[in-house]
Amino acid sequence: MPVIRVALYEGRSVAKKRAIAEAITDAMVRIAGSTREGVHVIFDNVAKENWVIGGAPETKGQAADD
């Protein structure tokens, strides 16, 4: 039972997340030999201010909180 976690900035539509989940499921079935029913896709919707790369939040152009 593969479990795939996808971290994205929040704000993606349900339709886009369904399309992403469908593509991931198709790939796991085709490449890994999983069953469709066994593939679990979990979306972690992260606010941009909570996504940090290289020690700096991904909020370019926004004022930092004190």
Image (cartoon, rainbow, N blue to C red):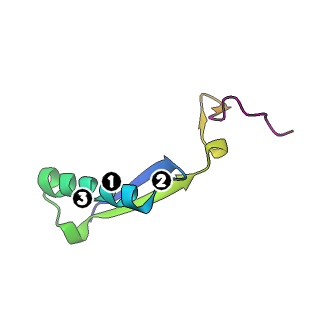
Secondary structure state at the residue bearing disc 3: helix
Secondary structure state at the residue bearing disc 2: loop
Q: Amino acid at mark 3?
A: Thr
Disc 3 and disc 1 in contact, CB within 8 angstroms: no
Q: Nearer the viewer, residue 52 or 20?
A: 20
Which is nearer the N-term, disc 3 or disc 2?
2
The residue at which mark 1 appears reads as: 20
Which mark, by number, is residue 12?
Answer: 2
Residue 60 higher or lower than 13, as above or below? above
Q: Position of residue 47 (x, y in %)?
A: 62, 49
Residue situated furthest bottom in the rendering: 37
Which image quarter: residue 40? bottom left
Q: For marks 3 and 1, give the one nearer the viewer.
A: 1
Identified at 87% across, 38% down, the residue is: 66
Q: For marks 2 and 1, give the one nearer the viewer.
A: 2
Identified at 53% across, 55% down, the residue is: 45
Separation (CA) of disc 3 from disc 2? 18 Å
Which mark, by number, is residue 57?
Answer: none
**Crowd rating for badge 3 (residues with CA inside 10 Å; few <14, some 14–19, many 20+):** many
The residue at which mark 3 appears reads as: 25
Q: Amino acid at mark 2?
A: Arg
Magenta segment: does it hold 60?
A: yes
Identified at 33% across, 53% down, the residue is: 20
Magenta segment: does it hold 15?
A: no
Identified at 42% across, 62% down, the residue is: 14
Dominant secondary structure, magenta: loop
Which range of residues does the magenta coloring cover?
A: 58-65
Separation (CA) of disc 3 from disc 1? 9 Å
